[in-house]
Image (cartoon, rainbow, N blue to C red):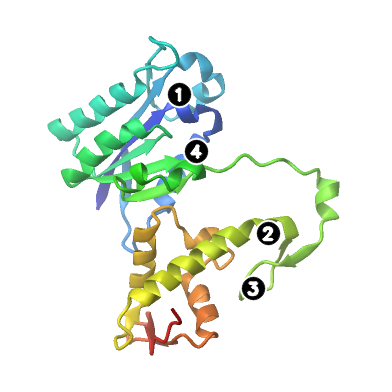
Amino acid sequence: MRRFIAVYVDLENVAGILNLDKLLQDIILEEDKEAPEEYVFAVKFACGNTNSISKLREQLINHNFDIREAPHISGKKNRADLIISLDAFEKLYLDKPSIDRFVFVTRDSDFSVIMDILRKYGKEVWLITQASDAQRPIFTSCTDNIILLPQPRQLIPQKERKDKPFEEEGPGTGAKRPQKEEEADKPKNRKAEELFKRVLISLDPSEEHLLTAIANKMRQLDKSFKIKNTSYKKMTTLAKEFEKKGWFRTIKNKEGHLIITDLDVPR
């Protein structure tokens, strides 16, 4: 099965922090489906003031992006959001090619208008943005999935890195990792735990519940949430940690999927 994807890059807002190779890979690797699919990037469109993208230009050319100039015409504002939105609407209207998923790489909330329209007509809409923008309601209300752009990291000299104390990588692992990385994971772990508990509280304690269904509800509550970005790495590891608290039991059904039963979650 083929899925046709349109990728729109707002150069004005994200050009300085993009790695296009990784970005296109992340769009594919984000899939949770077991059935193999072929992904075709049918539209690759970048728009903005191209005078400031010298480092990104080669990447865009190598990936055959259509680069559209949008110079500033009034103060600091250009028309990149309007140009991209009209192109996406044209693809929706003409349906040639028929796009399954529209991906917008931006921090500009003006794109929420076209995102909302695309979803209204049954299209899947993804947003790739910085963590500081991922929780804005104007974005979460008009997207199906949010991928976070990597935060710039300060390079640590190799000698200094070797001297850093190490801790356990996370629940259920024996690997070692720097203490700084472990500290950085704590907010992500807390977010996972909070979402997990919120979903558990909403469930009928007399029923059995698939762990995959719980994970889907967690993603609905926070579209930027990815269990792989926590030190738990997998939902099964997170569930086992909570099972130790006595909040439920886990069993496997005939298909080998993990089931949560005997719910007793403290409020």
| Residue drawn 55% across the image and 18% down it | 54
Q: Nearer the viewer, mark 2 or mark 3?
A: 2
| Residue drawn 46% across the image and 85% down it | 247
Please determine whether, in this image, residue 55 is positioned above or below residue 119. above
The image quadrant of residue 173 is bottom right
| Residue 173, label in figure | 3
- Callout 1: SS: helix
How far apart marks 4 and 2 lie (CA) works out to: 29 Å
- x and y, in percent, of residue 149 in the image: 50, 42
Q: Are marks 4 and 2 in contact (CB under 8 Å)?
A: no
Q: Nearer the viewer, mark 3 or mark 1?
A: 1
Earlier sequence position, callout 2 versus callout 1: 1
* Residue farthest toward the left in the current orientation of the protein: 94
- x and y, in percent, of residue 195 in the image: 44, 66
- Callout 4: SS: helix
- Tell me which amino acid carries mark 2: Glu
Identify the residue position indicated by label 2 in the image.
Answer: 183
| Residue drawn 29% across the image and 23% down it | 82
- Tell me which amino acid carries mark 1: Glu
Q: Nearer the viewer, mark 3 or mark 4?
A: 3
- Tell me which amino acid carries mark 3: Thr
How far apart marks 1 and 4 lie (CA) works out to: 19 Å
How far apart marks 3 and 1 lie (CA) works out to: 42 Å
Compared across the picture, whether 97 is left or right of 163 comes to left
Please determine whether, in this image, residue 177 is positioned above or below residue 92. below
Earlier sequence position, callout 3 versus callout 1: 1
Identify the residue position indicated by label 1 in the image.
Answer: 12
- Report the front residue among 30 and 15: 15
| Residue 21, label in figure | 4
- Tell me which amino acid carries mark 4: Asp
Q: Are marks 1 and 4 in contact (CB under 8 Å)?
A: no
